[in-house]
Amino acid sequence: MGFLTAFIVPSLAILGFYLGGFYNLITIFFIFLVIPIADYLIGEDPENMEADQARIISEQFYYRLITYMWAIFQVSFLFWGSYVIATNSLTTLEWITFTFSFALVTGGIGITVAHELGHKKSKIERFYSRLILMTVSYMHFYIEHNRGHHVYVATPRDPATSRKGENFYLFWARSVFNGYFSAWKLENSRLKRKGLSVLSLKNEMIWYSVLPFLFCALLTALAWQFGYSNYWNVPIFFFAQSFLAFSLLEIVNYIEHYGIVRKEVSPGKFERVNPMHSWNSNHRLSNFFLFQLQRHSDHHANAIKRYQVLKHYDESPQLPSGYPAMIMMAAVPPLWFRFMNPKLRHWEETVYHAA
């Protein structure tokens, strides 16, 4: 039942709005205060399932159902958010806090679910992944992450691998723009291999670039059609929450891969990805909310493995806390470097240079 806790976050966002005023901050306080404290008090969970049990659990439909429910919920949540923005005259502070709380749902958890589904083979799971990414205007992630990041992680070629000494804000610009252009290159290469034109309707990047705008237009048109007085706020809200949502994704990317590099075994070729090539966190509560994304080391070593059976590796580099606390730390570069550079040096001395 632990993974259903993810639905607490949108429940708080909805409750905060209807209570109004200060209560719009309740989701933000919960994510960045309550969860880090609970992570500290509850502690870590380094236990792994036995192989036979993992095979059974990985096939149980219940765990897939939770992700399907989230995909459908996220689309519904966007309709509700657009309704709220179009029918209420919010103060500037209410608008900002509501939008940020909203993005903690669509980006903090929603993109995590999209990431999980996008690695799977079934058409329905991949469809739901793209559907969620459409709601945050980041559909190219489906291409760049699977065909780019997982191939080139921890190498200079990967825009989503943060460099040693690089602060989050510089990383954000490099990862966002280079990741988008990388997705175009990867898709163009796929089409050329199949003998198709880049301008073909089978170019997924054309669709992925257009669909968020069409979805936003639908939300706006519905608000206008129903006569909601503030319908013109809908596109501003949609792209604002998208920006915040994919920025949350990028700060998580920054945390997961900061300074980690693979050894170059020959010019342009690198050692195989293993559990030593991502930062890991086993903090129990935040792992429930994030579908065990924090067991990132095993995810990169075994990308198709389902979230409920991801393993802990003692030898993987370990973060000092779960992602909510690490996000706050990464947002303040001097604080981040103070805590993480010594850990990175330890990894370099014991793993990279020792290999």
Image (tube, rainbow, N blue to C red):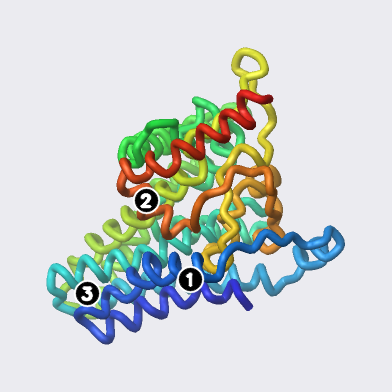
Instruction: Quote the CA–CA distance across marks 1 and 3.
Output: 36 Å
Badge 2 is on which residue? Answer: 329
- Which mark is in front, 1 or 3? 1
Residue 83 picture quarter? bottom left
Instruction: Quote the CA–CA distance across marks 1 and 2.
Output: 17 Å
Q: Earlier in the sequence, mark 1 or mark 2?
A: 1
Name the amino acid, label 3.
Ala
Q: Position of residue 340 (x, y in %)?
A: 45, 41
Between residue 92 and residue 230, name the one nearer to us: 92
Instruction: Quote the CA–CA distance across marks 2 and 3.
Output: 35 Å
Q: Does 13 appear above or below 304?
A: below
Q: Does 290 appear above or below 350?
A: below
- Asked which secondary structure carries label 1, the reply is helix
| Left or right, residue 92 beside residue 250 | left
Q: How packed is label 3: few (under 14 Cα within 10 Å), some, or many (20 or more)?
A: many
**Which disc, if any, is residue 284?**
none
Between residue 147 and residue 35, name the one nearer to us: 35
Q: Position of residue 79 (x, y in %)?
A: 36, 73
Residue 78 picture quarter? bottom left
Residue drawn 69% across the image and 31% down it: 272
Between residue 208 and residue 157, name the one nearer to us: 157
Badge 3 is on which residue? Answer: 86
| Left or right, residue 96 beside residue 162 | left
Q: Does 353 appear above or below 338?
A: above
Q: Are marks 1 and 2 in contact (CB under 8 Å)?
A: no
Q: How packed is label 1: few (under 14 Cα within 10 Å), some, or many (20 or more)?
A: some
